[in-house]
Image (spheres, grey):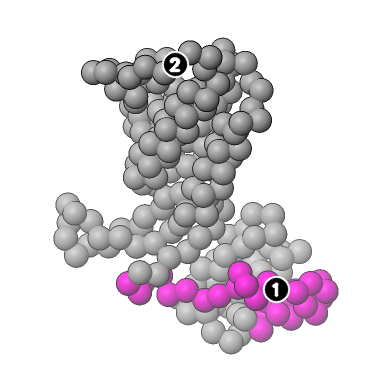
Amino acid sequence: MLDRRWNAANGPRHRWNARLVRYADDFVVLARYIGEPIQRFLNDLFEGELGLKLSQEKTRIIQLGQKGASLDFLGYTFRFGTSKLWPGQPYWQLHPSAKSQKRFRETIRNFLSKGNKVPPHDLLPTLNRKLCGWENYFRLGQPSVAFGKMDYYVTHRTWRHLRRRSQRKCHSFGKTGLHRALSNAGLFRLSQWRSRQRLVNT
């Protein structure tokens, strides 16, 4: 009903050139100016016709053109950034939001907790499936920084878990290094997403 009313001949889409982006019960309104008419339309529709109440915590007006302004939607953070190639030229950035990164770290921490009973030979394949799924969702935009930080977190969490589960005294990785050793063992690397993307594109 929301989409139908929004895009009707007398709806905000045609009256004020306002676009509606919606997924399930989350939505964003995009317009040059969101004034009292659009806000009144939403309040009348939700609280009047639908008998619903807009979340005051999630509902806010953002001027994305302002410095430092950003929008979190569907796990991503959207904002304007400044290009290094073209100084002074703003461009659209999107990357995993801080909340999404925190939630995934909690997922990894819970999976690699003391109560994990996954057999050692199934540990990395199961962990890799989680990492691959996260990459597939968040590979749009500029995820490199978030992917690099997540790789670091996963590597050290995995090493701590394996050291805790091992019945033998742990030895140093020497020149190989922790990251290289786990990569050689088959741990999925989010930071290699560009090379995988090139392989898919070719």
Tell me which corner region of the image, top left, top right, bottom left or bottom right, holds residue 12.
Answer: bottom right
Judged from the image, the secondary structure of the residue bearing numbered disc 2 is loop
Q: Is residue 10 left or right of residue 197?
A: right
Mark 1 neighbour density, 10 Å: few (under 14) some (14–19) many (20 or more): few
- Relative image position of residue 162 (x, y in whole percent): 50, 22
- x 51%, y 60%: residue: 72
Mark 2 neighbour density, 10 Å: few (under 14) some (14–19) many (20 or more): few
Magenta-colored stretch includes residue 53? yes
Residue 97 in the image: above or below residue 107: below
Magenta-colored stretch includes residue 50? yes
- Relative image position of residue 22 (x, y in whole percent): 62, 58
- Relative image position of residue 96 (x, y in whole percent): 46, 49
**Amino acid tagged 1:** Leu
Does residue 5 show up? yes
Residue 181 in the image: above or below residue 51: above
Quick one: 97 or 25, which is closer to the camera? 97
- The residue singled out by tag 1 in the image is 54
Task: Name the N-terminal-most of marks 2 and 1.
Answer: 1
**Amino acid tagged 2:** Lys
- The residue singled out by tag 2 in the image is 169
Magenta-drawn segment: 40-67
Tell me which corner region of the image, top left, top right, bottom left or bottom right, holds residue 51.
Answer: bottom right
Q: Nearer the viewer, mark 2 or mark 1?
A: 2
Main SS category, magenta section? loop
Quick one: 171 or 38, which is closer to the camera? 171
Residue 63 in the image: above or below residue 170: below
Judged from the image, the secondary structure of the residue bearing numbered disc 1 is loop
- x 52%, y 25%: residue: 164
- Relative image position of residue 160 (x, y in whole percent): 47, 29
Quadrant of the rendering where the N terminus is positioned: bottom right
Does residue 132 show up? no
